Image (cartoon, rainbow, N blue to C red):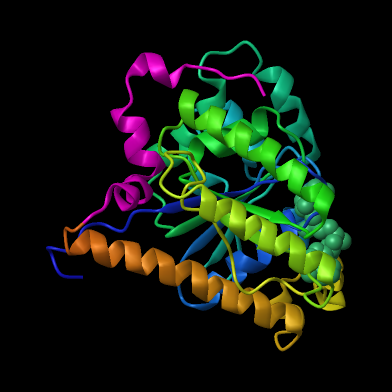
Amino acid sequence: MDESTPPKPVRVIALMNQKGGVGKTTTTVNLAAAIAQQGRKVLIIDLDPQAHATLHVGVEDNESPDSAPTVYDLLLDEDIDITDCIRTVDDNLEIIPAETDLAAVETELSGQAGRNQRLANAIARSSSDHEFILLDCPPALGLLTLNALAASQEVIIPMQAHFLALQGVSKLLETVGIVREQINPTLRVAGIVLCMHDSQTSHSKEVVSDLEQFFESQRDNGTAWASARVYRPPIRRNIKLAECPSFGQTIFQYAMWAPGALDYKKLGETITAEWDRALAVARSSELSDAEIRILKGAKESIEHRHPDEQHKEVQP
Ligand SMILES: Nc1ncnc2c1ncn2[C@@H]1O[C@H](COP(=O)(O)OP(=O)(O)OP(=O)(O)O)[C@@H](O)[C@H]1O
Ligand SMILES: [Mg+2]
């Protein structure tokens, strides 16, 4: 790398939707795997006590006392480094696993100063060399999700194109807006990934069109979702995607030519292409405000925040 090239910032993305079963874990794991297949180093952090992402990539139960630390230990013990918790999944793909005890973090951290910032601080102090960190959130707006939002530059919302899901999205945007105001001023909604999608029905076409019109109407209005988009391609409903977790494999390990693998591969290309464009712009020193916000990242935002602000808490 040429000496004038700035260090690669890490792109931290929370995959979040408080609604259950919408495709958060499937998207976290397979989008991470798609990006890793491009030769970019990716870390998945499983923040869900259900540990579905951990199981999806075939990492064993970690509850024996001798096993390496998990995300539970990372959140509770500030002496533990991210690199101590990592398990290798595949080339360029690593995970920090969850365990069922993770649910106890909510009570163990309650009342503690800076409890929302535990993950952000762990990422900021780590010397790990990942280019992308994808956070699999639980289907609830508790302390674990708040830690994910405090640590991320971006939120991607996996959802299904149903009218009722639209209502959930407005609540979710409101939450992201509150977190941005109170604990993470660089947080933005990157967009929506449509999961288990059936593009043929007029119902799903209407929902997608409503979403796009809504985001267009919000451009440059200063909200966390002012630059959000509906990502292409949507992820088609594909039985191979539902099967691969039970084999502890990503879709690329299980059925790399299945429609689900092709969709996540293209989505991965979209995600890395937009990141590369932002990095190229940064190198040419022609940064727009929006791009500066993306590039600053969790690390810098924490380092530059006033110590009092680091301890601000928001209630979900
Ligand atoms: N595109 C798809 N085609 C077929 N099945 C899918 C697809 N995406 C996800 N699924 C299946 O749908 C179910 C829910 O998906 P997933 O576990 O990813 O959702 P989630 O939002 O993480 O759920 P939770 O809220 O419980 O964490 C799983 O059984 C998964 O295998
Ligand atoms: Mg999940």
Q: Which residue is outermost to the bottom? A: 257
Compared across the picture, whether 22 is left or right of 305 comes to: right
Look at 67% across and 78% down and name the residue there. Answer: 263
- The quarter of the picture where residue 209 lies is bottom right
Q: Write the residue at 38% across / 13% down.
A: 308
Residue in front for this viewpoint, 246 or 152: 152
Q: Nearer the viewer, residue 137 or 201?
A: 201
123 relative to 211 in the view: left or right: left
For this view, does 17 lie left or right of residue 297?
A: right
Evaluate whether residue 73 shows in this view: no
Residue for point 68% across, 71% down: 234
Quadrant of the image occupied by residue 131 = bottom left
Residue 222 appears at what percent x and percent y? 42, 39
Quarter of the N terminus within the rendering: bottom left
Q: Is residue 304 magenta?
A: yes
**Residue at x 49% of width, y 38% of height:** 151
Q: Is residue 259 magenta?
A: no
Can the viewer see residue 283? yes
**In the rendering, at what x and y percent does residue 277 appear?**
34, 68
Q: Where does the image place residue 21, in percent across and percent down from the top left?
A: 83, 52
Q: Quadrant of ligand 1?
A: bottom right
What's drawn in magenta, residue-wise? 287-316
Q: Is residue 216 left or right of residue 126?
A: right
Quarter of the rendering occupied by the C terminus: top right
The location of residue 282, given as percent across then percent down, is 24, 59
